């Protein structure tokens, strides 16, 4: 079972990924090595029955699907933490662009300045259109050390930048991506409120063709922030990922779903959306009444990394 940790407001203010919540009990998965690869658990001391229903439905959603999947979610109102296959690492593909832009904002903060017009333009293109040239330009401006500094500040200890310098081959986990999403939605010492709002606004303006995945099944009345990654490679087939933040400061929840070994992009999207519809329908039942349809993109990768490069063995 996950361990429940009470995190005080003072502790959160002083620790970067503090992270997971303010003054709430947060379900934290135990040591990944001690759990089966497909270990799934949803827990909450505040809403145990809802957490149990969610876990039961998620087991059905992931059942019978080929490929490899991990997900992590957190609902602040019901204080539910849910984790599946969290010991696995994945090539980040374009989801790492959220990390890159967060590192840009943190760098500007530390330099006590606003983003330049060029930086704003590059950040917008990288997030809203998943522009690879823009992401590469920001990556080069920042340098590896500043991106690593952001990872350290958030507490993303399982995330590793690619030794060869390919930002799309950053190796990450669903739990680390959840930590990033939670950081973006609560006060802390990593990003200021202005910086967080800037990045969240960009994630809310992602072009329609890239708004598949975790938004599937969400209510048309719910605010959506999303960033996806979709990359085919010589090993592990298609990597298909989706990060989503839903709601506002009064009531929000977030989901990080990472997959690989998918035979096609659409297969990976379908697997993610089976999970997403269960999450939205269980946490916000009214979302089933008027949910937003998602697009069906062509079977073309996001171009975030070469099809094949030499690298250490993957897990």
Image (cartoon, rainbow, N blue to C red):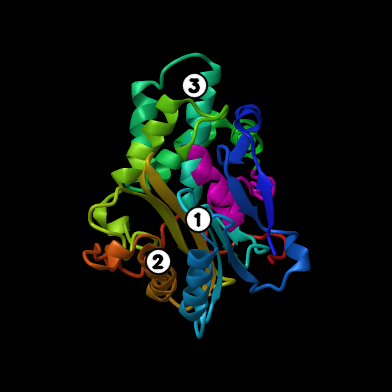
Please provide the residue range marked out in magenta.
156-184
Q: Earlier in the sequence, mark 3 or mark 2?
A: 3
Labelled disc at residue 282: 2
Q: Position of residue 261 (x, y in %)?
A: 55, 74
Quarter of the image with the N terminus in it? bottom right
Q: Position of residue 4 (x, y in %)?
A: 67, 52
Q: Tell me the residue that label 1 is attached to.
A: 93
Residue at position x 56%, y 41% from top?
21
Q: Is residue 122 above or below residue 70?
A: above
Q: Nearer the viewer, mark 3 or mark 1?
A: 3
Q: Tell me the residue that label 3 is attached to.
A: 108
Labelled disc at residue 145: none
Horizontal side, residue 48 vs residue 196: left or right: right
Horizontal side, residue 184 vs residue 204: left or right: right
Please indicate, yes or no, whether residue 125 appears anywhere in the rendered image.
no
Q: Secondary structure at mark 1?
A: helix
Q: Nearer the viewer, mark 3 or mark 2?
A: 2
Q: What crowding class fits label 3: few (fewer than 14 Cα within 10 Å), some (14-19), or many (20 or more)? A: some
Q: Secondary structure at mark 2?
A: helix
């Amino acid at each position: 079972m996950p361990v429940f940790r009470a995190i005080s407001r003072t502790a959160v203010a002083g620790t970067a990924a503090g992270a997971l919540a303010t003054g709430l009990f947060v379900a934290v998965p135990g040591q990944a090595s001690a759990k089966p690869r497909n270990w799934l658990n949803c827990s909450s001391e505040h809403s145990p029955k809802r957490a149990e229903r969610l876990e039961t439905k998620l087991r059905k959603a992931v059942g019978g699907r080929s490929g490899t999947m991990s997900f992590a979610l957190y609902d602040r109102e019901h204080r539910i933490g849910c984790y599946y296959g969290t010991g696995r690492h994945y090539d980040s593909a374009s989801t790492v662009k959220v990390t890159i832009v967060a590192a840009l904002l943190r760098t500007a903060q530390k330099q006590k300045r606003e983003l330049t017009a060029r930086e704003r333009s590059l950040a917008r293109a990288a997030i809203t259109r998943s522009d690879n040239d823009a992401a590469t330009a920001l990556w080069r401006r920042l340098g590896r050390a500043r991106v690593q500094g952001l990872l350290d500040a958030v507490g993303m200890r399982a995330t590793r930048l690619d030794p060869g310098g390919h930002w799309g081959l950053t190796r990450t986990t669903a739990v680390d991506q959840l930590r990033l999403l939670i950081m973006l939605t609560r006060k802390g010492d990593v990003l200021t409120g202005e910086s967080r709002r800037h990045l969240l606004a960009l994630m809310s303006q992602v072009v329609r063709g890239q708004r598949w995945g975790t938004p599937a099944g969400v209510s048309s009345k719910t605010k959506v922030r999303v960033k996806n990654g979709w990359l085919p490679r010589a090993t592990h087939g298609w990597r298909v990922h989706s990060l989503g933040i839903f709601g506002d400061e009064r009531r929000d929840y977030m989901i990080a779903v990472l997959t690989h070994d998918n035979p096609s992009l659409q297969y990976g999207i379908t697997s993610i959306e089976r999970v997403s519809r269960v999450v939205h329908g269980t946490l916000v039942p009214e979302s089933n009444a008027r949910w937003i349809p998602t697009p069906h993109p062509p079977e073309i990768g996001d171009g975030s990394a070469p099809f094949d490069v030499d690298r250490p063995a993957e897990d």
